Image: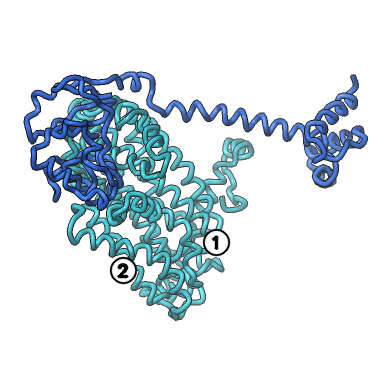
Amino acid sequence: MTVDARAQLCLVSFNEAWGSAWQPAPPARFRIAEAKSSFWGLAEGALGARMTRVATTHASASAEPTRRDFLFIATGAAGAVGLAATIWPFVSQMAPDAATIAAGAPVDFDLSHVAEGQIVKLFWRGKLIFVRHRTADEIKSAQNTDVASLRDPEADAARVKPGKDQWLVVYGNCTHLGCVPLGNEGAFHGWQCPCHGSVFDTSGRIRQGPAPINLPVPPYAFTSDKAIRIG
Amino acid sequence: MSGHSTYVPKSAVGKWFESRLPIMGLIHSSFVVFPNPRNLNYFWTFGGILAFMLVAQIITGVVLAMHYTAHADMAFNSVELIMRDVNYGWMLRYLHANGASMFFIAVYVHIFRGLYYGSYKAPREILWILGVIIFLLMMATAFMGYVLPWGQMSFWGATVITNLFSAIPGVGEVIVSYLWGGYSVSNPTLNRFFSLHYLLPFMIAGVVALHIWALHVPGSNNPTGIEKKTDKDVLPFHPYFTVKDAFALSCFLMVYVWFAFYIPNFLGHADNYIEANAAVTPSHIVPEWYFLPFYAILRAIPDKLLGVLAMFGSIAIMVVVPWLDSSKIRSGNYRPVFQIFFWLFAINAVILGWLGSKPPEGWYVIASRISTVYYFAYYILVLPLLGLFETPKSMPASIADSVLGKGGSGSAMASGAASSPSTKG
C-alpha cells in the first residue's frame, strides 16, 4: 500500500465517521504534499513556509479536512480521555482509605454509667458523638418548642428513639465549622459553640448563631434497655 | 527581563559561559543596571524583604523537616524534641514560626503600598494579580504549616478552615471528607498538609519569578505615579537600590530576630502547646493574627454559606481592583479625598483584625458588620466613584521635577546632590 492510498483510506473512514458534517475528500496527493512542505518549511523558519502553513490551516478549516485534522482530533480525543483517566486516581486517593473505612465498625456503649444530666463523649469513625442523659426539665423544654419556628424544623420525637426520651445521641461537632460545642451552655441550656457562637437546645437543634442545621443524629439502635450500638 | 543586556563578560571563562547560557547578562540587566525611579521611598524596599523572607522560610523549613515526624501520634512530640534535643532546634523553629509572621507583616505593607500609590493600575494589572496569587499561596502555606505541630490550635484551626468547604451546597460534605482523607481531621490530613506545606513555597517562588518578570516590563511604580521618561528620572539598581534595600532589610531583620529571640511566643497561642484533642475545642479559638481580618468578616455574617463567600470574596475582590478604580491619577499623593478613604480603609483593616480576635458576641458582632460593610464599600463604591468626582492636586511634570522641587510635592534635598547623585561617592 502506498502512502497516498493509506492516506485516502484513512480519510474515507474519517469521513464515514463524521458523516455529512465534512465535505467529501478531493485528491489526497495535493494536500499531503502541501502539508509536508509546510511542515518542513516551518522548521526552516522561512516566512514563505509560514504563509503556506497559514494557507493550509485556512483551507482545512473552510473546505475539506486533511489527514492532519484527523490526527489532531484523534490525538486530542485520546489525550482528553487519557488525561481524565490519569487525574482520577490522583483525586480518588484523597478519599478516606480502606483502613479508615474499616475502622467505622459499629461501637457498643453501655448507658448504665451515664448519670441523669450527664453528657458523655465517644468516637465512632473518628467523629465525636455526644450521649446525653436528659433530665425531665430538659426533655420538657425540648418537646414544648414550637417546631415551625426552628431554623431546621424537627420535632424532638424524631431525634430520639421511641420511649427513650431521656437519651439524646448526636454528633458532637458544630454544623457550622466543626468545633465541639460546650454542654449545658447557652440560652437554651443545650450546647453553645465557643468558636462562632452557635446555640443548640436540649434536643441538639440549632436555635441561634451561624450553624445551618441541627446536630445530626448518628445511626444507632438500642441493643438492650441500657446499651446502644452506634453504626 | 529588561530587554537586551549590555553585559560584557570580562574573563575568557565568562565569555565562554555567557555565549552558552546568558544568565549573568540577565542578572546584570535585571539587578545591576536596571533603571529604577530615583524617588522610591522605603515602602519600595518590602519587595526585597519579601524575597529574603521566602528564602529564609524555605531554608529553615527544609532543615526543620529533617527533624519533624508527620504522624498524628508523633508530630507533637517531634516538635518538642526539636525544641529540646536538636542542636539549635529551638532557634530554627522560632525563626520559622516568627518568620511566617514577619513575612505577613512585610506582605501587608507591600499590599497597602500598592493600594496607596495605585501600583495596580495599567500597565501593572498582571503584576498585581500575580501578587494576589502569591498572597493566596502564602495563606495556604501558612495555614498548613500551623497545623503541623498538631497542638490544639493546629487541630481546631484545621477543622474550622477545612469545614469552610462544607458550606458548598450539595457536594460540600464530600469535598471535606476528601480534604481530610477520613471522617474528621486525622492522620491522613496531617500527612497531606505536610506534603503540601513543603510544596507550596516552591510554587510561590515560581510565581515570584513571574511577578518580578512582570515588574521589569514597565519597571517599578514610584511615589509620584508618573512613569519614568528620561535618564534624569532614574538611577541604576546597583548600588543605589541594592544599598537601600539592604539597609531596610537590616532594620527589618532586627525586628524579626528580636521577636524570635526575646518574645518568640508573643504571636502564638498557649493552647498550641497542648496536644491535639478531638473531644475538646479550646474555649477561645482564633487563627493566627494575619488571618484575623478575614476571620472577622466570616463571623460578621450570620449565615454559613454567605459568611464563607464573603471571606473568600474579600480576597478575590483584590483581583479586580485595577478595573474598579476609575481615577486616572495613579498615586494617592495627588488625591486628597482618596487619602481620607484610604486611611479609613487601613484603620478599618486593623480594627477588623482586632475584632477577629474577640469572642463572637454582643457589640463585637455589630462592629464586625460595620467594618465588613466598609471593607467592601471601599472596593465597590469608593474606588469606582471617587475618580469621577475628585479634583486631584497639581502634579509635577516628571519624576526628576518632583525630586528637584519644581512643583508637585517638592523635596528638601539639596538640588545639587539630588540632580547628580551618581557623581557623589
Q: Amino acid at mark 2?
A: Leu
**In the image shown, does A210 or A147 lie closer to the viewer?**
A147
Which residue is found at the position 44% from the left and 52% from the top?
B132
Q: Residue B144 at what x, y percent from top left? A: 33, 38
In this rendered view, identify the residue nearer to me: B414 or B327. Answer: B327
Please give the residue where the numbered disc 1 appears in the rendered image: B123
Q: Of the residues shown, which amino acid type is indicated by label 1?
A: Pro
Where does residue A166 sit, x and y in percent of width and height? 13, 34
Which residue is rendered at x = 31% and y = 64% of the image? B346
Quarter occupied by residue B39: bottom left
Q: Position of residue B323 (x, y in %)?
A: 50, 63
Element marked by disc 2 = helix
Earlier along the polypeptide chain: callout 2 or callout 1?
1
How far apart are labels 2 and 1 at the CA level?
Answer: 27 Å
Is residue A149 at all visible to an observer of this figure? yes
Q: Quadrant of residue A9?
A: top right
Residue B243 in view of the camera: no
Write down the colour of chain B.
cyan
Q: Residues within 10 Å of mark 2 (few under 14, many from 20)?
A: some
The residue carrying mark 2 is B344
Going by the image, does B421 lie left or right of B157?
right
- Name the residue: 17% across, 35% down: B280
Give SS at disc 1: loop
Which residue in the rendered view is the most extreme toward the front? A163
User: How many numbered circles does the render carry?
Assistant: 2
The chain drawn in blue is A
